[in-house]
């Protein structure tokens, strides 16, 4: 970015610029911009790149805050929102026929861990004259690089894996200079720049990003291997993690992710009532709506990230109300697996 806001820290500051440069290098992007939260970053992408009268296509399977932004804020400023299933080529073709200016997706998807064919999406979307943005929070660089697959803008809740210590709230947008200038203009006008202390914490965390994420990925893989081997005895309806051989996007996982990540999801038989009982019996997973910290975390998305979603909306996103989302930390993975086994066994 040519504009660096040296004269006023609300426009930019030295530690922020150093952190932005480090993240841009990880993404292999022309630049990166830090924000006070992931939602501030995503809002800046939408309002920086779109104008009243534009259309944006947003996938059904997205974080609940993204859905609220699309439902409530964007129509208020004259931006029309089109919703679609990103795994359905006909649905994509349908929304592209509506001539959106921007298409927004997640990959891996929260909380089902589905992985999109970003290269194919980018080709189709660019052919229709639109831009593609992706929320890639669940697998950060260098383990996933969407820009290399043709994506135009990458968004992360840096609160999660990039920060990694559950002590900073931040967001980041990476991409080409042309798009970043419009996004930076919105950040400057709206005042959503990341503060200097938080930028220092985020920059500190980048030094251990690869070690943390590799350990968390191995731990989640170990936990899934244990659960998958006795899933019938534990009453597991569905189990999600990119490491699983039966993952529906197996080829894309292998081709585009250098590590599967530390997040896994479990849907026990018995719906929300049983999921809540399992949640209450867990002892080594801390209750939190966040993920990718050094400590292991658990949440019920229906009460947190996707609170208030109807059954129909959950179905369109590919999961049910009785799903538990877990984030493996740096603890002993066997102990974490044992904790899940005892909680599931006790609630059958």
Image (cartoon, grey):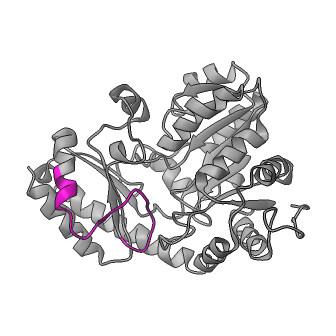
Q: Is residue 4 left or right of residue 170?
A: right
Residue 226, quarter of picture = bottom left
When the figure is inspected, residue 142 is found, relative to residue 307, above or below; the finding is below
Start-end of magenta stretch? 277-295
Q: Position of residue 186 (x, y in %)?
A: 78, 47
Tell whether 321 sits left or right of 182. left
Vertical comparison of 128 with 216: above or below:
above
Q: Is residue 324 above or below residue 284?
A: above
In which quadrant is the N terminus drawn?
bottom right
Expressed as whole percent of the image width and height from the top left, the position of residue 327 reads 38, 62
The answer to whether residue 29 shows anywhere in this view is no
How far from the left and from the top, in percent, is residue 81?
A: 63, 26
Count all numbered tags in the image, as a single digit: 0
Q: Say which residue appears at 42% left-offset and 67% top-offset.
A: 217
Residue 70 forms part of the magenta stretch: no
| Percent position of residue 33, x then y | 74, 60
Q: Residue at x 56, y 74 (%)?
A: 209
Residue 197 visible in rendering: yes
- For the point 91% across and 62% down, which residue is it? 2
Question: Up-down: is 89 above or below 289?
Answer: above
Asked if residue 280 is among those painted magenta in the image, a careful observer would answer yes
Q: Residue at x 71, y 29 (%)?
A: 77
Given residues 184 and 77, the one toward you in this image is 77
User: Quarter-wise, where is residue 6 in the image?
Assistant: bottom right
**What main secondary structure does the magenta stretch of the protein show?**
loop
* Viewer-side residue, 180 vs 27: 180
């Amino acid at each position: 970015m040519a504009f660096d806001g040296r004269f006023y820290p609300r426009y930019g500051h030295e530690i922020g610029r150093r952190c932005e440069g480090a993240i841009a290098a990880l993404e292999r992007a022309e630049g990166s911009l830090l924000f006070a939260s992931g939602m501030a970053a995503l809002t800046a992408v939408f309002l920086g790149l779109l104008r009243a009268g534009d259309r944006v296509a947003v996938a059904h399977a997205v974080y609940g805050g993204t859905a609220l932004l699309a439902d409530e804020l964007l129509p208020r400023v004259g931006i029309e929102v089109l919703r679609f299933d990103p795994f359905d080529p006909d649905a994509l073709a349908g929304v592209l026929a509506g001539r959106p200016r921007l298409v927004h997706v997640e990959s891996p998807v929260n909380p089902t861990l589905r992985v999109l064919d970003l290269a194919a999406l980018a080709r189709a979307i660019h052919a229709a004259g639109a831009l593609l943005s992706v929320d890639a929070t669940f697998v950060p660089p260098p383990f996933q690089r969407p820009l290399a697959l043709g994506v135009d803008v990458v968004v992360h809740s840096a609160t999660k894996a990039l920060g990694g210590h559950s002590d900073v709230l931040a967001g980041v947008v990476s991409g080409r200079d042309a798009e970043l200038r419009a996004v930076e203009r919105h950040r400057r006008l709206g005042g959503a720049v990341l503060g200097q202390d938080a930028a220092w914490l985020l920059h500190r965390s980048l030094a251990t990003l690869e070690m943390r994420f590799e350990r968390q990925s191995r731990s989640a893989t170990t936990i899934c291997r244990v659960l998958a081997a006795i899933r019938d005895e534990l009453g597991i309806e569905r189990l999600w993690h990119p490491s699983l051989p039966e993952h529906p996007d197996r080829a894309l996982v292998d081709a585009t992710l250098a590590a599967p990540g530390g997040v896994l999801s479990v849907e026990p038989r018995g719906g929300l009532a049983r999921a809540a009982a399992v949640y209450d019996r867990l002892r080594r997973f801390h209750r939190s709506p966040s993920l990718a910290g050094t400590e292991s975390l658990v949440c019920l998305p229906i009460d947190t990230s996707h609170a208030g979603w109807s059954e129909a909306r959950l179905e369109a996103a590919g999961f049910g109300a009785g799903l538990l989302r877990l984030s493996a930390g740096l603890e002993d993975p066997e102990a974490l697996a044992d904790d899940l086994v005892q909680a599931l066994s006790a609630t059958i």
